[in-house]
Amino acid sequence: MSQLILIVEDEPDLATTLAYNLEREGLRTRIALNATKGLEYARLDPMPDLILLDLMLPDYPGTEVCKQLKIDDRTKDVPIIVLSARTDEIDRVVAFEIGADDYVTKPYSPRELLLRVRGILKHRPVVVEQADEIRVQRLKISAGSHRVWFDESEVDLTPLEFKMLLTLAQAPGRVWTRDKLLQDVWGGFNVTSRTIDTHVRRLREKLGDGGSYIQTVRGVGYRFVSPESA
Ligand code: CA
């Protein structure tokens, strides 16, 4: 299940644009047009994984919403990104003091905001329903211990290489664009397509014969396949 973002924003146009941009990136959204609804939706099941909170709301200030959420056991761990039209340093300081995780000044670029959202989400434990061990033909991956074996001999991977292999192997056959890998493996950090290609090449080299499990999809990205079953 993809992660859920609660948008607390009283300008409907802004809220829907934001929702559109987030959903395009595979996230789910819920919109609250005032503070009261914001608090209500934050506690609704399923709980949001992150809250985007406008400070200037019609019923009462976003800072109050933030405070309420941070003193409630159910919501205190949900990260909050404050959206504010004001650039005053004081607002920024106040936002962090009341427990906001990040602060974005309006007008923001959708891309910048998305990077902030991704940056925060990647530090949140994602509940992945999966067996701890993935076995595909001659390849064995232990998700829990971060170890990999090919033909029963262990392959020494960097944490990034491991993450990439695990990401690909968890969805065999699925095509990953470089953009998607950038989001899911690098957490949206600014690396070039070439960096991704270089890491894939190294990963393949380390896997030896197992390198052929990672297939290049021309002009698009990569996918994991098990050659023996193809
Ligand atoms: Ca507002």
Image (cartoon, helix red, strand yellow):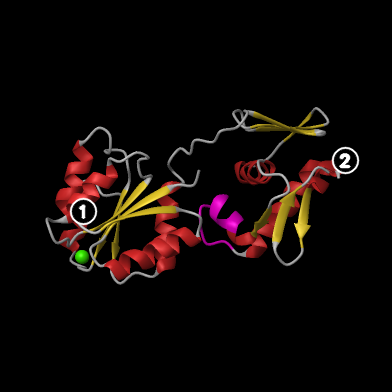
- Left or right? Give the position of 23 relative to 144: left
Q: Residue at x 43, y 52 (%)?
A: 28
Stretch in magenta: 180-191
Q: Do the CB atoms of the residues marked 1 and 2 lie less than 8 Å apart?
A: no
Residue 22 among those drawn in magenta: no
Residue 182 among those drawn in magenta: yes
N-terminal label among 1 and 2: 1
Residue 99: image quadrant is top left
- Looking at this rendering, what residue extends furthest in the left direction? 60
Question: Which residue was labeled with disc 2?
Answer: 228
Q: Amino acid at mark 1?
A: Ala
Ligand 1's quadrant: bottom left
Viewer-nearest residue: 178 or 173: 173
Q: Residue at x 24, y 51 (%)?
A: 38
The disc at residue 95 is 1
Q: Can residue 180 be spotted in the picture?
A: yes
